[in-house]
Amino acid sequence: MLFKTLCEYLEKLSLTSKRLEITSILAKLFKEASSCEIYETVFLSLGTLNPQYKAIKFNIADKMMVRILSKAYTIPERDILKKYKELGDLGKTAELFSESFVKQETEVLEVYQKLKRIAMEEGAGSQERKVHLMSMLLKSLDRIGAKYACKIILGTMRLGFSEITVIEALSWMEKDDKTLKKQIEEKYRIYPNIGFIAKEFKENGLFGIKDIHIETGVPILSARCQRVDTAKDIIKRHKTSAIEYKYDGTRVQAHLDRNKLSPAPLVKTFTRNLEETTNMFPDIVSAILDSVKAQSAILDCEAIGVDPKTGEFVPFQITIKRKRKHNVKKTAKEIPLKLIVFDILFYNRKSQIHLPFVERRKILESIIKESDKIIIAPEIVVDNTNKFMEVFNTAIEKGLEGIVAKDLTASYTVGSRGYAWIKFKREEKGTLEDTLEPVVLGYYRGAGQRAKFGIGAFLVGVLDEKEDNFKTIAKIGTGLTDEQWVRLKRRCDKIKLLEKPKNYIVPKELFCDIWCEPNILTSIRADDITISPIHTAGYALRFPRLVDFRDDISTKDATTVQEFKNLYKLWKK
Ligand code: AMP
């Protein structure tokens, strides 16, 4: 397929916000792509080159793209800048300046390879090489091609869909309906490489993806916790429940494979959002190699910082200082991590996710040699509310945020919030027990007192996983310190958009003055959740207050509409 053809589909996608229409356009695109180019087609349509866990960054910012356009079209940088300011989008700027006479014959695969090469350039002189390669590529592309090549590189495609819609489109491609979605999604949850799945599926349908299994080195979508509002509910659901402390650290999925040598055995760690973090955690890597007695294993864990002087756990804000790419050794010394292992998903070449928790736990206990670097999460099995509350109160006295109750009979709920795991946190009277993590969608310029900051309120929304869009739940105008207002405005301005993205479902009366990309995650507390005729989630927060910004997790972790509705039901019980 020509890159131009792909771009024509992308253009059609950019003109609609209707999910059914998006799905149908994608299905046609995937039908037209051959099986040797579907991997590349899928990722390019998502505006990337690879799955999250193998992400390669272009490291090309706006300023550099202005230079690239200047070089490609031999136009002074100031003229490019002027047009960019007018249009607000470098893709559109490239479209405008590119030569109308170029007859583009470049194939999708060729463009993909060239983009990959640009992304992989690193080291001394790499910036110059990137400028050269990209300007050459732009010269060979026609208007629409130049527009989308720029957007892909800058990460500004914003077509308003994610892997979930791609999965549905694959089903439509094959069956003209969504009946295969469930089976494809099941594979995606244990092997979240949507390009690879698309290829296998395109070649041989469901038969083609039958043999996709859990593999070391490829992260699995993590299980999530549900909430209930009383201890009685937990006992009612689980009958007997294994109670573990809820550690306030960072989730780590650790992979070990002593049969995969390069030349050392494979050890990798991933976040809950499928990002690889191995290089950040040399202490976890050595703890896994030293203490896990298995040929291969995938472990679900929480890593938490320890004060080297007192041996006590450090607060969450300190632990996440370990999530950095520079000065890794020094920070590892200052804040050593303890790995608390609470589940095993794969052991000696076999998936364990279908085993009941009690059996998975037995395997864990037989293969982990505990040390000051790695332990198995202590658990206490309870079958009545009195005993439950005793354990819970001990957790609170120890300064932990709560407990996670685990159903001994349940299998591992890959990538979803099931009642197999129930979190139960400290209660704060008169307010919602738990914080919510909505996303900032945009802000309103201030009036009166706050006009001096240029921001007076901001709009937050939750993620609708089914419809693949964001719905509003609150406009927040209080509870921030002056410094937080300034910081929020600065962050929003950095990622501001010219218009409301298609996948923000916002009522007219709540339209923001400035829209931004859904990249700022907040932690919000409120007094109540009420039914709302205005907010598009159908419910709204009463007296919402900002607790903090959450820099440690990505927007894929945002509270979902489904969770929000669930919370409403709990609150109203
Ligand atoms: P939340 O983010 O509030 O939904 O809580 C779920 C998170 O709690 C998980 O993603 C883990 O990072 C963390 N966690 C801490 N301790 C445990 C535990 N014992 N079992 C499962 N998750 C835990």
Image: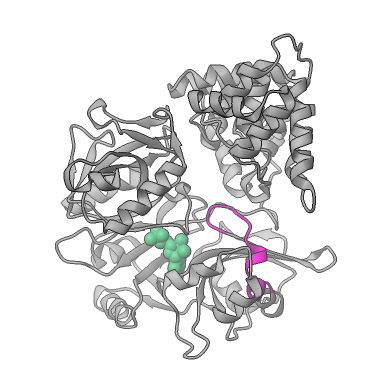
Whether residue 345 can be seen here? no
Whether residue 208 can be seen here? yes
Viewer-side residue, 272 vs 562:
272
Residue 288 relative to residue 90: left or right:
right
Which residue appears at 38% of the width and 67% of the height? 405
Q: Position of residue 460 (x, y in %)?
A: 31, 43
Task: Farthest residue to the bottom: give it.
Answer: 309
Query: Which region shows up in magenta?
Result: 271-285
| Residue 96, placed above or below residue 183 | above
Whether 276 is among the magenta residues is: yes
Task: Farthest residue to the right: give it.
Answer: 263
Viewer-side residue, 360 vs 483:
483
Quadrant for ligand 1 reads bottom left
Q: Quadrant of residue 173?
A: top right
The N terminus, quarter of image: top right
Q: Position of residue 18 (x, y in %)?
A: 43, 21
| Residue 308, placed above or below residue 36 | below
Whether 316 is among the magenta residues is: no
| Residue 333, placed above or below residue 4 | below
Q: Quadrant of residue 335?
A: bottom right
Residue 212 relative to residue 536: left or right:
right
